[in-house]
Image: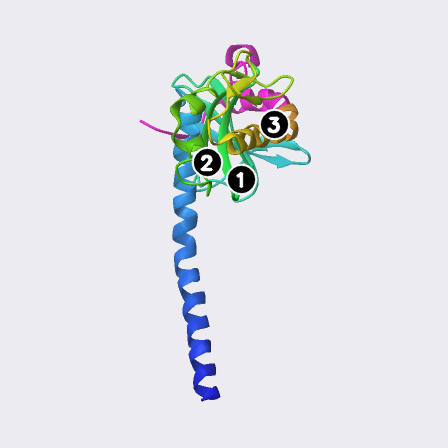
Amino acid sequence: MMVTLGIAGLCSGLAIVGIFLVTKPMIERNRAAALEAAIYRVLEGAKSRVAFVIREGKLAPFESPDDSLPKEEAVYAGYDQAGKLLGFAVPAEGPGFQDTIKLLYGYSVARQRVVGMEVLESRETPGLGDKIIKDLDFVGDFRDLAVEPKIVAVKGGSTQENEVDAISGATISSVAVCNIINEANARWLERLVEAEEAAAAVNGSSPDAAAAGEAGSRGID
């Protein structure tokens, strides 16, 4: 009896491991595809992108023979049809009400503003916390949002350039999104400013003309 149970347990374990190994590449491809698409949504007008990774403490263009997204931590510069840099798409994550929230936001160095935000993964409460994905007014508040002194979620309607209107019934999730972006800003903004010249150099244009210009390595129609 014990031997039979042991064999059954071993077979079940092997089956679980096998399923994980088979599905993991598919899950990773789907996540990469979702991130790729989101880059162009949080940077309105972007037609191409270049990934930047940290090298010796500074951001540098990521080189990939097949143009795949880097597996390491990265930000993504987005460019319009003419090759002008529109901003950077910055992945970020942090605790929500239920679990970790993963998101992507667009940041314009020239304007010093968040210019878009999209939640990539969330397990917030259905019908309440998940409104950080579905509430168009909330998401729209991140399309032209000042980052100084920090982004704040408020109740009753935003009145300042750095405020977003917290979702009724999902205040904790709303605040969590703001906190995640604030923490990411503390980590990335100085590096993004420094990366402007590198971005312009990749494109072969001047920093003034591009306000951080650079050509993307991959485009969309």
Q: Is residue 43 visible?
A: no
Of labels 3 and 1, earlier in sequence is 1
State the image quarter where residue 21 is shown.
Answer: bottom left
Residue 195 falls inside the magenta stretch: yes
Residue type of the residue flagged with mark 1: Phe
Q: State the SS at label 1.
A: loop
Tell me the crowding category of disc 1: few under 14, some 14 to 19, or many 20 or more residues within 10 angstroms, Cα based: some
Which label number is shown at residue 182? Answer: 3
Q: Which residue has dot 1 on it?
A: 97
Query: In which quadrant will I find the N terminus?
Result: bottom left
Query: Who is closer to the viewer here, 87 or 95?
Result: 95
Q: Seen from this angle, which residue lies furthest right?
A: 57
Q: Which residues are magenta?
A: 192-221
Tell me the crowding category of disc 2: few under 14, some 14 to 19, or many 20 or more residues within 10 angstroms, Cα based: many
x, y (%) of residue 14?
A: 44, 72
x, y (%) of residue 100?
A: 53, 42
Q: Which residue has dot 2 on it?
A: 129
